[in-house]
Image: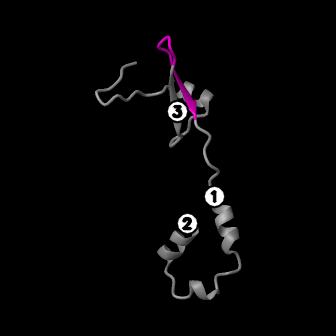
């Protein structure tokens, strides 16, 4: 495996799967005294699900704050 001129390397799929590394996962690096490099998955902050966003506004489509709001504005509201 080679490191690119930008310092990038592709983590093999099997390693990513075993380590639970998904796209957009955040990782941390540790360089040990013997030169070994350890990559650790950083615990992600809980993300709001689409379901929780809809639960937040369920039954409020007729609320005054949504009157005249377009689809793009409403979707931006749901996404926070």
| Numbered tag placed on residue 28 in the rendering | 3
| Numbered tag placed on residue 22 in the rendering | none
CA gap between label 3 and label 2 equals 27 Å
Q: Residue at x 43, y 28 (%)?
A: 10
Q: Residue at x 49, y 25 (%)?
A: 12
Q: Earlier in the sequence, mark 1 or mark 2?
A: 1
**Mark 2 crowd level (few <14, some 14–19, many ≥20, 10 Å Cα):** few
In the rendered image, which quarter is residue 41 located in? top right
**Label 3 element class:** strand
| Residue 34 is inside the magenta segment | yes
**Mark 1 crowd level (few <14, some 14–19, many ≥20, 10 Å Cα):** few
**Mark 3 crowd level (few <14, some 14–19, many ≥20, 10 Å Cα):** few
Does 45 sit above or below residue 77? above
Instruction: Give the magenta-colored segment's residue range.
Output: 32-41
Residue 25 coordinates in the image, percent (x, y): 54, 40
CA gap between label 1 and label 2 equals 9 Å
Q: Earlier in the sequence, mark 3 or mark 1?
A: 3
In the rendered image, which quarter is residue 55 located in? bottom right
Q: Which of 18/32 is in front? A: 32
Does 62 sit above or below residue 56? below
Q: Give the colour scheme of this rendering.
A: one colour
Q: Tell me, yes or no, whether the two marked residues, 1 and 2, touch with CB atoms within 8 Å.
A: yes
Residue 24 coordinates in the image, percent (x, y): 50, 43
Does 46 sit above or below residue 17? below
Q: Residue at x 52, y 32 (%)?
A: 28
For the C terminus, which image quadrant?
bottom right
In the rendered image, which quarter is residue 66 located in? bottom right
**Label 1 element class:** loop
| Numbered tag placed on residue 80 in the rendering | 2
| Numbered tag placed on residue 48 in the rendering | 1
């Amino acid at each position: 495996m080679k490191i690119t001129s930008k310092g990038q390397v592709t983590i093999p799929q099997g390693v990513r799967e075993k380590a639970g590394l998904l796209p957009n996962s955040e990782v941390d690096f540790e360089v040990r005294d013997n030169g070994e490099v350890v990559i650790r998955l950083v615990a992600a902050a809980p993300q709001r699900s689409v379901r929780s966003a809809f639960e937040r506004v369920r039954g409020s489509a007729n609320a005054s704050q949504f009157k005249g709001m377009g689809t793009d504005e409403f979707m931006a509201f749901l996404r926070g």
